C-alpha cells in the first residue's frame, strides 16, 4: 500500500518545520501538528481518497452531465480520481476495474453499461478488499458483491412516462417505442414500468419497440424505419431518453408530420434540449432522471471507506416536466 496523501503531507510538514527550526538555531524537535478542525483521528478525509471510476461512455447529454458532475465534485473536494471512459464496451469497463484493483484504489465507482456479466470482476474487487459502488445503472449480481447502488428508480420513470402518455392519448392510440441500450438497467426497467401502466388501457397498443442505443443518431434512424412501416398511423412515441426523442423529432419533421401534435412524444432525462423542444412545441413531456450524482457519490465513498454503513440503494429525487413550465425552468437546468 502506498503511503496516503495525508501521511505524505504530514511528513513534508514535519521536515519543513524541522528545517526551519535548525536554520533559526533552535533545538530541532518534532513539532505538534494541529489536526484539521473536523478530522477525526484515524478517519480518512476526502483528500486521502483515491477513487477509480469506470464510466460507460458518452452516448447522451445525460451521460456528459453525469461525467462532468463526477469530475467537478472530485476536483472541488480534493479527491484523487482515476477516470476511465469505456466507450460503450463492457470489456473496457472490466479492464478498467482490474487496473483499479491493481492500483489498490480505496473505492471503485462503476456505471455498468449492461446488467449482466459482472460477477467475476466484482468478486475480484471484493477479494482485494475494495468496495464497489454502483452509480446510475444497476448490475445483476448477488447483493454481497457491491456496497451500494445510487441512482434512479427506472421502473417508476417508465410508469410515469406511461401515465403521461395515456393522458395525452386519452386512452386510445398506437405507440412506438425507442428503447435504450439492450440489456442495460434503464432500458429493461423503463420497458417494464411503461407496460405495467399501459396494460390498464385496452385502447392503447404498443406496435413496435426497437433500440436506439440512447443516441440521437440511432433514435433518428430507428424512427425513420417506424415511419416507413406505420407512417401516420402512429399516435405516440415513447423514447427511453431525450436524445433519442430529439433524433426522432427530426425524422418526424422530415417525414412531413408535426412532432408533439400529430405524434405525441414522451421521453426521459430532462436535459436542457428537451426543455427547448417543449418550448418549441415538439415534445409533450420529459420525465426527470438526475445525473448530478458526483457530490453524493464521494460522500458515500468516504463513508464506506470509514466503515460507516450505508443503505443498499440510495434513490434520486426526480420530477416530471411539461411544456407550460419549460420556458421558466430552462435557465435553472444544469444538464
Ligand atoms: O437515461 C440515458 C443515458 O443510465 C440513466 O443512460 C442512464 C441513461 C440515461 O445514456 O440518457
Image (cartoon, helix red, strand yellow):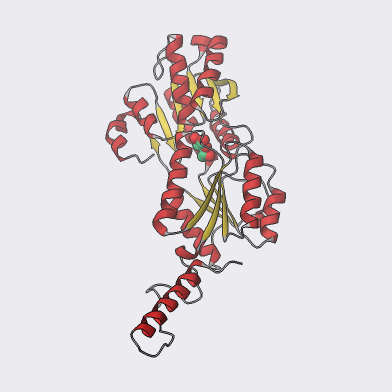
**Picture coordinates of residue 194, whole percent (x, y):** 54, 32
Quadrant location of the C terminus in the rendered image:
top left
Identified at 53% across, 56% down, the residue is 51
Residue at position x 43%, y 44% in the image: 68
Say how many tags the image has.
Answer: 0
Closer to the camera in the image, 198 or 313 = 313
Q: Is residue 34 in sight in this rendering?
A: no
On screen, 59 above or below 106?
A: above
- In the depicted view, which residue is nearer to us: 86 or 196? 86
Relative to 49, say whether 28 is above or below: below
Q: Residue at x 46, y 10 (%)?
A: 255
Quarter of the image for residue 310 reads: bottom right
Image x and y of residue 199, in percent: 57, 29
Instruction: Check the image and name the residue furthest to the right.
Output: 120
Which residue lies most toward the bottom here? 27
The picture places residue 292, in percent across and down from the top left corner, at: 43, 46
Q: Is residue 196 left or right of residue 27?
A: right
Residue 28 image point, x, y percent: 41, 87
Front-most of 286 and 114?
114
Q: Quadrant of the N terminus?
A: bottom right
Instruction: Name the residue at 51% across, 75% down.
Output: 42
Q: Is residue 286 visible?
A: yes
Residue 312 is drawn in which quadrant? bottom right
Amino acid at each position: 500500500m502506498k503511503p496516503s496523501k495525508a501521511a505524505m503531507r504530514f511528513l513534508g510538514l514535519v521536515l519543513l518545520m524541522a528545517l526551519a527550526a535548525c536554520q533559526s538555531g533552535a533545538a530541532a524537535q518534532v513539532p505538534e501538528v494541529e489536526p484539521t478542525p473536523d478530522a477525526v483521528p484515524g478517519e480518512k478525509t476526502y483528500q486521502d481518497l483515491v477513487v477509480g471510476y469506470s464510466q460507460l461512455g458518452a452516448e447522451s447529454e445525460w451521460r456528459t452531465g453525469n461525467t462532468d458532475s463526477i469530475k467537478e465534485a472530485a476536483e472541488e473536494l480534493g479527491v484523487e480520481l482515476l477516470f476511465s471512459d469505456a466507450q460503450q464496451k463492457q470489456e473496457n469497463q472490466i479492464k478498467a476495474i482490474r487496473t483499479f484493483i491493481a492500483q489498490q484504489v480505496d473505492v471503485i465507482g462503476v456505471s455498468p453499461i449492461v446488467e449482466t456479466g459482472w460477477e467475476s470482476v466484482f468478486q475480484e474487487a471484493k477479494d482485494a478488499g475494495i468496495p464497489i459502488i454502483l452509480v446510475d445503472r444497476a448490475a445483476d449480481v448477488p447483493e454481497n458483491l457491491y456496497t451500494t447502488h445510487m441512482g434512479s428508480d427506472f421502473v417508476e420513470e417508465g410508469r410515469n412516462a406511461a401515465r403521461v402518455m395515456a393522458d395525452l392519448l386519452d386512452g386510445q392510440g398506437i405507440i412506438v417505442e425507442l428503447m435504450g441500450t439492450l440489456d442495460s438497467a434503464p432500458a429493461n426497467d423503463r420497458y417494464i414500468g411503461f407496460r405495467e401502466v399501459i396494460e390498464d388501457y385496452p385502447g392503447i397498443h404498443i406496435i413496435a419497440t426497437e433500440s436506439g442505443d440512447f443516441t440521437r443518431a440511432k433514435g433518428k434512424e430507428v424512427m425513420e424505419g417506424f415511419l416507413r412501416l406505420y407512417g401516420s398511423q402512429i399516435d405516440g412515441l415513447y423514447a427511453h431518453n431525450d436524445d433519442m426523442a430529439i433524433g426522432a423529432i427530426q425524422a418526424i419533421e422530415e417525414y412531413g408530420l408535426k412532432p408533439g401534435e400529430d405524434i405525441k412524444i414522451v421521453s426521459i432525462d430532462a436535459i436542457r434540449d428537451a426543455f427547448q423542444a417543449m418550448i418549441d412545441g415538439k415534445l409533450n413531456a420529459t420525465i426527470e432522471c438526475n445525473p448530478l450524482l458526483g457530490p453524493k457519490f464521494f460522500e458515500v465513498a468516504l463513508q464506506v471507506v470509514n466503515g460507516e454503513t450505508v443503505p443498499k440503494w440510495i434513490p434520486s429525487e426526480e420530477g416530471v416536466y411539461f411544456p407550460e413550465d419549460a420556458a421558466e425552468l430552462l435557465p435553472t437546468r444544469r444538464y
